[in-house]
Image (cartoon, helix red, strand yellow):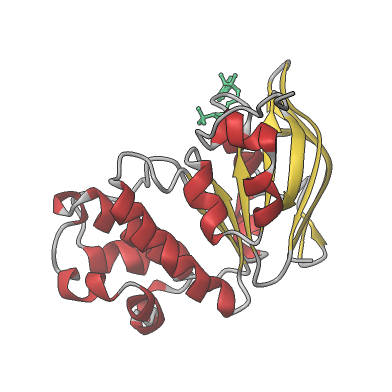
Amino acid sequence: MMLEIDRLTAGYGRVRVLHEVSLSVDEGEIVALVGPNGAGKSTLLRAVTAMIPDRSGSVRVAGRELIGVAVEDVAAAGVAHVPEGRRLFPGLTVRDNLRLGGWVPRNADLGPVLEIFPRLADRLNQVAGSMSGGEQQMCAIARALMGRPRLLLIDELSLGLAPLVVDEILARLGGIAESGTGVLLVEQDAGAALEVADRGYVLELGRIGLSGTAAELAADPRMRSAYLGGDPPQAPVS
Ligand SMILES: Nc1ncnc2c1ncn2[C@@H]1O[C@H](COP(=O)(O)OP(=O)(O)OP(=O)(O)O)[C@@H](O)[C@H]1O
């Protein structure tokens, strides 16, 4: 397993947000984590990356325990995080944003990430803040890939983007996973996430409510009525 979370409890000070959450992401697998606002999805990503100190349970990446280690050790274990809102350096060029993502910036080879996001190749000298939202999201994911992570955590990829742009970016995740990287995708847009994911989990009030393959979740009546905009299950007509 690339990521194995076992009974993770986490929160902020005395407020517990996650309650004994267990989930996994295999090598080369795309796993969607969906659920309502405030369920704790971003908190789960922050707990994996050691950005919040109040954690218990187990978080293992490629077999290595990350509970109790510091943020820099998380990066060294091969975890990259694309946070909500992208957090690019808007005044720096695309090239410099990408180079900052490499663990050894001076030696960073941009080739592999430009292959995944060719659109960035034409914009290397443009300042990141002047690009479209979709291009900025590509830049944020590309920056995270510069360290050749084993595990890529992406928070709200679709935030503020048009559906067609979201589809274009999501379509690239397959290529990233093909190289063996595990992808954990936190997404408000459950329908779009399940289209590219292999499996998924639904987080509700800090607990896993439902899980299964993407096809199972997409067909689940509760999932359809709550998150996929489908009709609620109908009573049988007598
Ligand atoms: N820094 C913080 N300090 C205290 N409470 C926080 C902090 N960040 C988040 N929370 C609380 O933790 C809970 C879960 O928030 P989180 O952002 O993880 O949810 P989410 O599922 O990602 O929601 P959304 O889809 O709206 O981003 C919320 O009740 C939120 O108010």
Pinpoint residue 75: horizontal percent, then vertical percent.
60, 60
User: Can you say whether 174 is above or below 196 in the image?
Assistant: below
Q: Quadrant of ligand 1?
A: top right
Identified at 76% across, 52% down, the residue is 66
Q: On the rendered image, what quadrant is the C terminus found in?
A: top right
Examine the image and state in which quarter residue 137 appears. bottom left
Q: On the rendered image, what quadrant is the N terminus found in?
A: bottom right
Is there any visible trace of residue 185 in the rendered image?
A: yes
- Residue in the foreground of this view, choosing between 49 and 35: 35
- Residue in the foreground of this view, choosing between 113 and 125: 113
Q: Residue furthest front?
A: 238
Pinpoint residue 113: horizontal percent, then vertical percent.
38, 75
Horizontal relation, residue 28 to residue 116: left or right: right
Horizontal relation, residue 154 to residue 4: left or right: left
Examine the image and state in which quarter residue 221 appears. top right
Identified at 25% across, 49% down, the residue is 133
Identified at 57% across, 37% down, the residue is 42
